[in-house]
Amino acid sequence: MTRGEPTTATGRRGLAIIGGGKIGEALLSGLVRRGGADGLLVVERSPERAAELTGRYGVPAVELAEAAARARVLLLAVKPQDIDALLGLVAGHVDEGHLVVSVAAGVPTARIEAALPSGVPVVRVMPNTPALVDEGMSVLSAGAHAGEQDLDEAEALLAAVGQVRRVPEAQQDAVTALSGSGPAYFFYLVEAMVDAGILLGLPRALAADLIVQTALGAAVMMRDSGEHPVQLREAVSSPGGTTIAAIRELERHGVRAALMAAIEAAHARSVELGRDGA
C-alpha cells in the first residue's frame, strides 16, 4: 500500500499529522525520507513551528478543517494532557471515511471514540523517538470500529520508521512503559557510563564514542544472535575478571530492582494518563 491509498469516495487521500512536537516530527521525517512529501500534511498551532516544519520537510502546514477535508488518515500526535481539547476540535470534521490514529500515551481508544461521531475507526499506537532514525518501535491496537484493513493501513505508515507490532489494547500501558519510554532509560544509562569514563580520566568525546558504539554493537548482537541476554552477558564475564566485578556492584546497588521499579512507575503513570481528566 502506498501512502496515497486508499482514496475514499470523498476524494480524501494521504495523511495529516496533527501536532508538530517531537514524536510528530519523528514520524513526519521518517515518512518524508521513505516516500517524499506527497500526500502528507501537518497541522501545528504555533505558526513559527508550522513554518519550521514546512521549511525542513516540504510538507504543507494547513488548518485542521482543511486537513480533515483532504486527508484520509488523521494522526493525532499530541500529549495526553492535550488530547481532549484536540478531540473537541476534530469531532466536527471527521466521519466514518476517516481513520484516526492516536499516539497520545495512555489514552484508550474508547475515550477517543466517545468524543468522535459514531463509527469512526480509531487505532491506538505507541511509537518511540528512534523513529527519527528509522529505528522506531511502534505498537498498535484496534478500537471498536477499526477493522483489519485499518490496522494494515496504520501498520504500513508506521513501518516507514521502524518495526511494528500489534497487541491487545489491554497491553498498551505496559508497552508505553517498556518501549515508549524505553529510549530514555538507555540514554540515562549511557550518560552515567560516559560520566564514569570521565571520572577514570578519559576525554568526554572519546568516552561517548566508546559507549555509543558499544551500545550499538550490543543491541545488534541481541537482535541477531538468537541468544538470551543472560548468555551474552555471561560470555563477557570471565571468572575473576573485570566484568563480573562490575556486575557484582550493580547487583549490590540494586540496579536491576531499581529499573524494574522505574518501569512499573511508568506503567502506573500511563494508566493514570488514560483516565478522563488526568
Image (cartoon, rainbow, N blue to C red):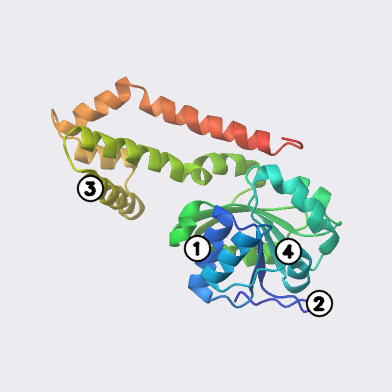
- Determine which of the numbered discs, if any, sits on residue 210 in the image: 3
Which residue, given by chain and number where applicable, does mark 4 sit on?
99
Mark 2 residue type: Thr
Regarding residue 204, the answer to whether it shows in the image is: yes
Residue pointed to by mark 1:
161
Q: Which residue is outermost to the left?
A: 240
Label 3 vs 2, first from the N-terminus: 2
Estimate the x, y position of residue 162 in percent, counting from the top left: 48, 61
Q: Earlier in the sequence, mark 3 or mark 4?
A: 4
Distance from Cα at disc 1 to Cα at disc 3: 26 Å
Where residue 140 sits, quadrant-wise, is bottom right
- Between disc 1 and disc 2, whose residue precedes? 2
- Position of 88 compared to 198: left or right? right
Residues marked 2 and 4 touching at CB (< 8 Å): no
> Are there few (<14), some (14-19), or many (20+) residues within 10 Å of tag 3?
some
Residue located 76% across and 66% down the image:
98
Q: Above or below — where is 176 with respect to 44?
A: above
Q: Amino acid at mark 3?
A: Leu
Disc assigned to residue 10? 2
